[in-house]
Image (cartoon, rainbow, N blue to C red):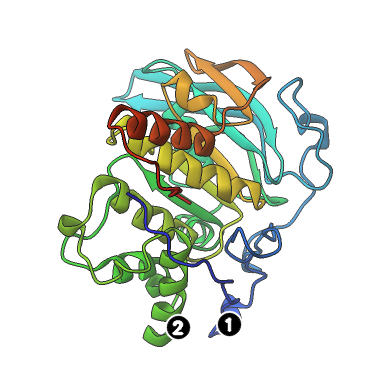
Amino acid sequence: MANNDSMQPVEERQPRTAEETTDTPSTPNRQTEPLAKGGEQSSAVTVHNPPTSHSSTGPGQTGRGGRPVIVVHNLTKVYHLGQQVNVPALRGVSLAVYPGEFVAVMGPSGSGKSTFMNLIGCLDTPTQGEYWLNGKLVSSLSNDQLAGVRNRMIGFVFQGFNLLGRATALKNAALPMVYAGYSKREREKRARKILSLVGLGNHINHKPTELSGGQQQRVAIARALINGPSLLLADEPTGNLDSHTGLEIMALLQALNEQGLTIVLVTHDLNIARYAKRVVQFFDGRMVSDEPIKEQHSAHEEWLALQEDQARAQGKVMVSEVPV
């Protein structure tokens, strides 16, 4: 069950070097003002104007104003197997994602959704097309530049948690700040606050083997938030969890989104996609639909209803305890 530690505002961290003086958004907190968006990156990245003619893609858009967080135009990825075999994984995808959106990306195996996630996560580069992140063209950056973008602007949550087995929750959550060059004192101070935010303030010294699956995923979410990203990418974040714990994680993601964090989630499960605000469907490397969710489900309300059902079945009076 989630821990109900008090949520305290997360202080803005101060960069240590001139190269790191960026406008980093604060971490979302339900008791503080909405999340600032649009973390900046170093001057090594070329700044242009994204192709506005492709930043409005139809019914899936929410109509929010301002600059899109993501704009992709004619994004294509072809894998070359040997000298004569070409495998097209993504075929000319164009869409935009605006600040504060919660987008679910769906599709069967081989549809291109994982390739799309790798590209917008700056884990790979497109064969053709453009990718703009926070108004900056990143699709043609070098590997070193992409690594910097990933560290400062994007948070990742994976199905398998990907935690360091011998490290505590505190050290796992603080890991991205190690790569950013922050002092141990700064890292631990911020990691404590982020772990408290996700309900693990009393588990900071626990190692992954001492945590439940849901708690491990909360550590992974804390790690994704530690550098104040403007975009959170979640790849099947409930895939290794039971339905009850999965509700807790989706409630946490919805709470973060309510504070303004932009989220793109990959899932094969329509029930999980209904917690998002918009669903993009992929098939055979192409985007085949982009629609808003007409009635977004509330994971928080469903979790409370499940608790009530369980308490009623056991003849007990329910104690109000919420996952976030």
Q: Is residue 236 visible?
A: no
Q: Are marks 2 and 1 in contact (CB under 8 Å)?
A: yes
Task: Give the residue displayed 54% in from the left and 58% down from the top.
Answer: 149
Task: Give the residue displayed 43% in from the left and 46% down from the top.
Answer: 123
**Crowd class of label 2 (few under 14; some 14 to 19; many from 20; radius 10 Å):** some
Task: Give the residue displayed 74% in from the left and 44% down from the top.
Answer: 68
Residue 176 place in picture, x, y as percent: 41, 66
70 lies left or right of 275: right
User: Which mark is on residue 186?
Assistant: 2
Task: Give the residue displayed 38% in from the left and 39% down from the top.
Answer: 237
**Crowd class of label 1 (few under 14; some 14 to 19; many from 20; radius 10 Å):** few
Question: Residue beneath label 1, please?
Answer: 14
Between 110 and 58, the residue placed more toward the observer is 58
Q: Secondary structure at mark 1?
A: loop
Residue 196 place in picture, x, y as percent: 43, 66
User: Which mark is on residue 222?
Assistant: none
- Please say if 152 is above or below 273: below
Between 20 and 195, the residue placed more toward the observer is 195
Amino acid marked by disc 1: Gln
16 lies left or right of 52: left
- Please say if 89 is above or below 38: above
287 lies left or right of 307: right
Q: Is residue 222 visible?
A: yes
Disc on the earlier residue, 2 or 1: 1
Q: Secondary structure at mark 2?
A: helix
106 lies left or right of 56: left
Residue 24 place in picture, x, y as percent: 63, 68
Residue 22 place in picture, x, y as percent: 64, 72
Amino acid marked by disc 2: Glu
Between 75 and 158, the residue placed more toward the observer is 158
Between 23 and 188, the residue placed more toward the observer is 188
